């Protein structure tokens, strides 16, 4: 959003960005309510949503019940190449590329 910010209500700008996106990436690591809302909005529009979460947090508490049944790509600070490969593979399958 920092690259597209302009005057107006940020919620409306985010809705436009989500509406115009090919997919949405939602990080559940910090249980940010906004991330859940944005993901739900995207899903309602029929956009593919790729959920990601830091592995230690996910192993400890999973994710909110609204997303605990969704595919979640896990990431670790000390192993970014695994995450990158998993995310790209999931994205390709999700977009039929």
Image: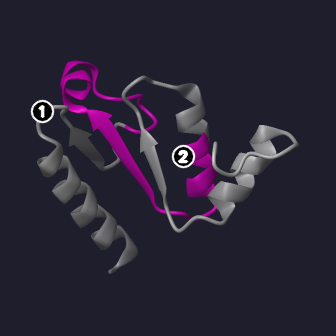
Q: Tell me if residue 54 comes above or below residue 60 in the rendering.
A: below
Mark nearest the camera among 2 and 1 is 1
Q: In which quarter of the image is the N terminus?
A: top right
Nearest the eye: 96 or 5: 5
Which labelled disc corresponds to residue 87? Answer: none
**Label 2, label 1: how many angstroms apart (C-alpha)?**
27 Å
Residue 3 appears at what percent x and percent y? Answer: 64, 49
Residue located at (32% from left, 81% from top): 97
* Residue depicted at x 73% and y 45%: 5
Secondary structure of the residue carrying tag 2 is helix
Choose top left, top right, bottom left or bottom right for residue 86: bottom left
Residue 70 vertical placement versus 44 (above, below): above
Identify the residue position indicated by label 1 in the image: 78
Residue displayed at 84% across by 39% down: 9
**Is 52 included in the stretch rendered in magenta?**
yes
Where in the figure is residue 51, as x and y percent of width and height?
38, 46
Residue 44 on the magenta segment: yes
User: Element type at marker 1?
Assistant: loop
Q: In front: 58, or 13?
A: 13
Q: What stretch is highlighted in magenta?
A: 38-67
Q: Seen in the image, is 77 located left or right of residue 36?
A: left
**Residue on which disc 2 sits:** 39
Give the x, y percent position of residue 52: 33, 42
Badge 2 or badge 1: first in the primary sequence: 2
How is the rendered protein coloured? one colour
Label 1 crowd bin: few (<14), some (14–19), many (20+), radius 10 Å: few
Q: In this view, does 1 lie to the left or right of 27?
A: right
From the viewer's perspective, tell me whether residue 94 is left or right of residue 84: right
Q: How crowded is mark 2: few (under 14 residues within 10 Å), some or many (20 or more)?
A: many
Q: Mark 2 and 1 residues: CB-CB less than 8 Å, in contact?
A: no
């Amino acid at each position: 959003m920092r690259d597209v910010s302009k005057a107006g209500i940020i919620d409306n700008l985010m809705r436009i960005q989500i509406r115009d996106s090919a997919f949405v990436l939602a990080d559940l690591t910090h249980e940010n309510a906004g991330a859940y809302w944005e993901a739900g909005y995207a899903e309602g529009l029929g956009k593919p949503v790729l959920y990601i979460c830091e592995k230690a947090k996910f192993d400890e508490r999973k994710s909110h019940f609204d997303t605990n049944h969704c595919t979640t790509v896990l990431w670790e600070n000390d192993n970014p190449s695994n995450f990158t490969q998993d995310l790209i593979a999931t994205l390709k399958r999700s977009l039929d590329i």
